[in-house]
Image (cartoon, coloured by chain):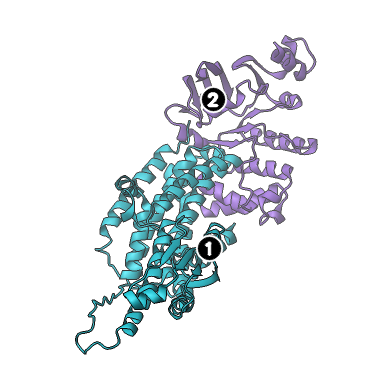
Amino acid sequence: MLPIIFIMPILQILILSNAATFDIKKIKMAYVDHDKSTFSRELISKFQASPYFVVTADFPASKLGLDAIQQGKAAVLLEIPTDFEKDLIKDKESSLSIQVNAINGAIAGIENSYVNQIIQKFNTNIRAKLMPVVPFGKGLKQVVVKPSFWYNQNLDYKIYMVPGIIVLLITMVTFFLSGMNIVREKEIGTLEQINVTPIKKYQFIIGKLFPFWVIGIFLLFLGMNIGRIAFNVPIVGNPAVILLFASIYILVFLGFGFFISNFTETQQQAMFIAWFFVVIFILMSGLFTPIESMPSWAQKITEYNPIRYFIEVIRMVMLKGSGFKDVLPQLTRIIIFSIVMNTLAVVSYKKVN
Amino acid sequence: MNNIIQVKNLTKQYGDFFAVNKISFEVKKGEIFGFLGANGAGKTTAMKMLIGVSKPTSGDANVAGFDVFKNPEKIKKSIGYMSQKFALYDDLTVNENITFFGGIYGLTRKVIKQKTKALLQYLEIENLGKTLVGSLPLGIKQKLAFSIALIHEPKIVFLDEPTGGVDPITRRQFWEMIYEKAHQGTTIFVTTHYMDEAEYCDRVSIMVSGKIEALDTPKKLKEIYKVDSMNEVFLKLARG
C-alpha cells in the first residue's frame, strides 16, 4: 500500500501536468483554394509556417472540406474564393470563409482568434504591398497593443496547473485513506475489539488520522519539489504559508473521511460517497475552469468548497508571492471548516450504539 | 459482593423485535459461565450490552461493579474481550499487537516488555514475536488473542465463540488455558456452539428467542431434562 500512496502521486503530477493543458497547438486545418493565385498561396503558406496549425489537406470543393470536418480530419476549414487576388488588387478588399468545428466552444473561439491573427498579419502585409508609395508620416497609423504578462510571463500552462494538481493529490490521498481506513477496521472486526477497550474517542481518532496527516504533508513537499525540478514551477512566496495552510486543510478532509466512515459499513459505500464529493469539489474548485465564469448560484456553492481555497492559496503563494496576510480570508474559512468537520467526526463516532 | 455480573430484566429492542427479552441472571466471581443458544437467539446482543458497546433498551445490569448505563467505559477497563471474528491486527506483528493492546489498557512500556516475554513463553512461540499475526495458523492466533484479552489482568473475560473453526487439539488446549485462568480467579463468560465445551462450564444458560430458558449446572440440566448429554438438552430446548 505504501508504495502506491507515494508512486501514484508522482506519476499523477508528471502525467497530469502535461496533459491538463488548455494550450491549443497543432490545429488540424484544411483549405479549399478556388483562386490558386500568388496571394492565396501566400496566405496558405502563412498558416503552414505557424506552429499553431498543421495544414492537413487541400480540397477541390467545399463539400469535401466540410466532410473532412464531419469526419474529424480537420478542425478548421479555410475557403478562398475565386478572384480573391483580383478583388484585392482592384477593389482593395475581398472576403474569406472560415468554418470551425465548435463542439467545444472555448476551443473553437481560440482557434478562430488564431486564424484571425494570421489573416490580420497577411492583411497588413498586403496593404503595404498594394499601397507602396505613401509619403512619410501619412501612412496608416495603427494602435499597437503590447501586453505584458505578469506572474507567468511565458503563459506556460503547466505553471498554472501544477500547484492545483498538487492540491488535488493531497486531497484525494488523505480523504480516501481516512474514509477507507476506519470502515476497513469495521469490516475486519478490529473496530469492535477497539470499542471494547477503554480507549478514549479522541485518542483513537488522533491515532488513526495523524499518520495520514503526515503523509499529506509529505506529499506537499514531494509535489512542490517535482513541480520545481520537472516543470520549473517557481515558489515565489514563502513556503511556510503554504505549509501552515496545508496542515489545517488536511484536517478538513481527514475529519470528513472519518465522518463518512462512521456512517458506512463497507469500503465500497465509503468510496462511493467520497467520490461523489471529490468530483463535485474538483469540478467546482477553479482548477480547470475559472470560478468567475460560473453562474452565480454555482459560485455560492464554491464558497463551501475547501479545495477551492487551497488552490487559490497555493497559486497565490507559489506564483504571485502572496504572504500570510493575503491568504488570511481563505485561512479563516478553512479553520472554520476543519473545526466543523472534526467536531462532526468526533460526535458521530460512537463506541456504544 | 460475590456476584461479579448481575443482570435484571435486561432488554434490547429493535422496533417491535425483542432481540433480548427481559433476561435475568448472576455470574459468580471465578466462575466459568457458559452462555448458549442457537444462532439468532440473542446471545451476542446480550453480551454486547454487558461489555458496554450496545446500550440496553431497559433493565439493569452491573458488570464488575459498574452500571452498564452509567459507566460503560469503566467496565471496559475491567474486562477482556475476544470475539468470534478474529480481532487482532493481521498486518501487525505479534509483538506489535501485544504492545498496542497493552498500551490501550494503560500498561507501561516496562510492564508490556515483561508481559510480552512471559506471554510468548507461555504460548511457546518465542521465535514468532516478529511474525505478522496474519501469517500465523488459526489455532495460535486464537490462543494469542485470548492471552492478549487477558493482558491487563481483567476481572472478567468475555469470549464470543472463541473456538470457532479450530481443531480439537487446539480446542482442548484452549480450554486448559481457560481453566487455568479461572483457577487464578478470573471470571469467564463464554458463548459456544460446541456442547462438549458446555460440559466444561460451571454453569450454563440456554437462550431461546431472546429469553433464558434454562440456567443451571450441566449436571442438573441433564437431570431436569432427563437426558445424557448437553447436546440433547440443547436440542430439546432449542426445538421448543
User: Which secondary structure, mark 1?
Assistant: helix
The residue under label 1 is: A65
Q: Residue at x 46, y 32 (%)?
A: B72
Q: Which mark is residue B5?
A: 2
Expressed as whole percent of the image width and height from the top left, the position of residue A25 reads 47, 70
Badge 2 local density, few (<14 within 10 Å), some, or many (20+)?
many
- Spot occupied by residue A109 in the image (x, y as percentages of width and height): 39, 61
The x and y percentages for residue B58 are: 46, 19
Frontmost residue, A301 versus A60: A60
Give the chain coloured cyan: A
Q: Position of residue B105 (x, y in %)?
A: 51, 44
Query: Quarter of the image holding residue A8?
Result: bottom right
Secondary structure under the numbered disc 2 in the rendered image: strand
| Figure quadrant of the C terminus of chain B | top right
Q: Amino acid at mark 2?
A: Ile
Chain holding disc 2: B
Q: Residues within 10 Å of mark 1 (few under 14, many from 20)?
A: many
In the displayed structure image, the side of residue A143 where residue A67 appears, left or right: right
**Residue lying at 46% horizontally and 67% vertically, measured from the top left:** A78
Instruction: Report in which chain the residue with disc 1 lies.
Output: A
Residue B221 in view: yes
Name the kind of residue labelled 1 in the image.
Answer: Gly
Tags 1 and 2 on a common chain: no
Chain the render paints purple: B
